[in-house]
Image (cartoon, helix red, strand yellow):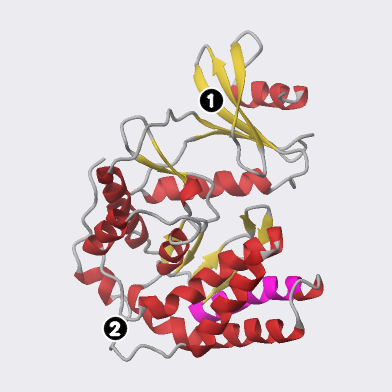
């Protein structure tokens, strides 16, 4: 049942009074939040809430969705309203998207659109984000760094590795493997990131955060946005079930990957594996340590990278039709 305080807040923020509300229906909101469909005289909306979420939890999601929408390329749910600081129970109200099924062409469309989105970023602030946000239910530290490898090591790998060690979830030997992997990040990642330039990332791109509208149009949900190397999203998309091959083929046709991307794959998959290890423990800890060991053993690719930014400029953007 939707908390009364949430319904009251939503009514004030979005102009949806009791006289406008025709009915509610519980829907799946994932493993973190509660969610419902609100049927009103002005249409149907998607509402989610979480009594244990911090005051900035849903605002971070709303800001991420708005940033992706402003960049263009891939559709996201429109943010209708978000709770204010004083909300008793934090909540977020979004556009309702009627889901359909995904054909091969839908996945191809997503691949092309994601490439377009990632190539559209032109800000020279560096790598990171203006404020911290969240991934899943965990804090995600951001800020800006000029060096991508250092950002990945210091803002993504080391904080979670320290938390896991502090919680006793990894042994001293396993912690040393994670630490060596962070040390290798710059040598392994910087050349390709420099060649591609920074991209706006979804940040949590797995199959559960992609849906397809009734007409097959791809839609991205539940982002953890920041600016980084585009291979982050692609690497995560290959975890937890993965995406169909049609997606990757379409992406590479739109924007070919730099040499050595398979060598960089475990470095980029290490972060979401650490997130899952921190949230769920179990086999994710071992999977993270295995990925870290592969990073330490990886050799920098011998193929020469083009000068920084040249890959972004030289190929046809192929902006997908709306």
Residue 209 in percent (x, y) is at 49, 47
Magenta region, residue range: 146-164
Q: Is residue 158 left or right of residue 293?
A: right
Which residue in the protein does label 1 denote? 45
Residue 72 in percent (x, y) is at 36, 48
Cα separation between marks 2 and 1: 47 Å
150 magenta-colored: yes
In the image, residue 74 sits, relative to residue 82, either above or below, namely: below
Q: Nearer the viewer, residue 264 or 321?
A: 264
Q: Nearer the viewer, residue 236 or 228?
A: 236
Residue 28 in view of the camera? yes
Within 10 Å of disc 2 (Cα), the crowding (few <14, some 14-19, many 20+) is few
Residue 209, numbered label: none
Which residue in the protein does label 2 denote? 307
Q: Main secondary structure of the magenta part?
A: helix
Residue 141 in view of the camera? no
134 magenta-colored: no
N-term-proximal mark, 2 vs 1: 1
Within 10 Å of disc 1 (Cα), the crowding (few <14, some 14-19, many 20+) is some
Residue 284 in percent (x, y) is at 63, 66
Q: Quadrant of the N terminus?
A: top right
């Amino acid at each position: 049942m939707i908390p009364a305080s949430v319904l009251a807040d939503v009514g004030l923020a979005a102009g949806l009074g009791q006289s406008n509300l025709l009915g509610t229906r519980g829907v799946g909101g994932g493993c973190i939040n509660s969610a419902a469909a609100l049927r009103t005289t002005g249409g149907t909306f998607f509402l989610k809430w979480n009594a244990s979420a911090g005051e900035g939890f849903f605002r971070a999601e709303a800001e991420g969705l708005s940033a992706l929408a402003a960049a263009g390329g891939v559709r996201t749910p429109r943010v209708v309203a978000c709770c204010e600081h004083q909300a008793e129970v934090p909540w977020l109200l979004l556009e309702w998207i009627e889901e359909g099924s995904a054909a091969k062409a839908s996945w191809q469309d997503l691949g092309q659109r994601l490439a377009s989105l990632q190539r559209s970023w032109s800000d020279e602030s560096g790598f990171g984000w203006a404020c911290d946000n969240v991934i899943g239910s965990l804090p995600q530290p951001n800020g800006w760094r000029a060096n991508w490898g250092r950002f990945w090591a210091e803002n993504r790998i080391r904080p979670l590795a320290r938390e896991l060690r502090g919680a006793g979830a990894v042994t001293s030997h396993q912690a040393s493997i994670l630490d060596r992997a962070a040390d290798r990040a710059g040598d392994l990642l910087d050349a390709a990131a420099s060649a591609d330039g920074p991209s706006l990332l979804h940040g949590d791109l797995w199959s559960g955060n992609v849906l397809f509208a009734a007409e097959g149009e791809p839609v991205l949900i539940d982002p953890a946005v920041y600016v980084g190397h585009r291979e982050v999203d692609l690497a995560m998309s290959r975890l937890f079930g993965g995406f169909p091959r049609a997606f990757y083929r379409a992406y590479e046709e739109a924007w070919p990957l730099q040499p050595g991307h398979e060598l960089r794959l475990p470095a980029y998959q290490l972060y979401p594996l650490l997130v899952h290890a921190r949230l769920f423990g179990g086999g994710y800890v071992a999977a993270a340590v295995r990925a870290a060991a592969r990073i330490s053993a990886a050799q920098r690719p011998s193929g020469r990278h083009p000068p920084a930014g040249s890959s972004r400029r030289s190929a046809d953007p192929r902006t997908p039709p709306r």
